[in-house]
Image (spheres, grey):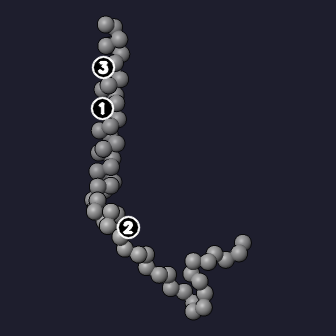
Amino acid sequence: MSIIYVLIPIAILFVCIGLGIFFWAVRSRQFDDLNKEGMSILFEDEKKTGKPGTDPDQQPPQ
């Protein structure tokens, strides 16, 4: 029965941590546009423009 004196504070701590993470996510605007990222997978990326005759995806040698 004495274990309940340990489990209740631990449960309250977990709830406070979860609420803190949730309010941080809301404050940092993580939930603003949930549909945009889901729809962006359906469209192709825009082509990068560069000098004619060069491949914009190719990295210069290091």
Disc on res. 8: 3
Question: Which residue is the site of mark 1?
Answer: 15
Q: Name the side, left or right, on which 57 lies relative to 42.
A: right
Front label number (3 vs 2): 2
From the viewer's perspective, is residue 34 above or below residue 47?
A: above
Please name the amino acid that badge 3 sits on.
Ile
Amino acid type assigned to the residue bearing label 2 in the image? Ile
Q: Alpha carbon of mark 3 to alpha carbon of mark 2: how far? A: 44 Å
Q: Nearer the viewer, mark 1 or mark 2?
A: 2
The secondary element bearing badge 1 is classed as helix
Q: Position of residue 16 (x, y in %)?
A: 31, 33
The disc, 3 or 2, on the residue closer to the chain's N-terminal end is 3
**Dot 2 corresponds to which residue?**
41
Q: Residues within 10 Å of mark 3 (few under 14, many from 20)?
A: few
Near mark 2 (Cα within 10 A), the count class, few <14, some 14-19 or many ≥20, is few
Residue at 32% from the left image edge and 55% from the top image edge? 30
Label whose residue precedes the other's in the sequence (1 or 2): 1
User: Which residue is rendered at x = 38% and y = 67% of the image?
Assistant: 41
**Quarter occupied by residue 45:** bottom left
Amino acid on which disc 1 is placed: Val
Q: Residue 8 placed where, x, y %?
A: 30, 19
Q: Is residue 19 left or right of residue 50?
A: left
Taking the view exactly as shown, the residue that stands out farthest to the front is 42
Question: Residue at image x 60%, y 87%?
Answer: 54
Q: Position of residue 23 (x, y in %)?
A: 29, 45
The correct choice, above or below, for 36 with respect to 31 in the image is below
The relative height of residue 51 versus residue 4 in the rendered view (above or below) is: below
Q: Quadrant of residue 4?
A: top left
Q: Is residue 20 left or right of residue 48?
A: left
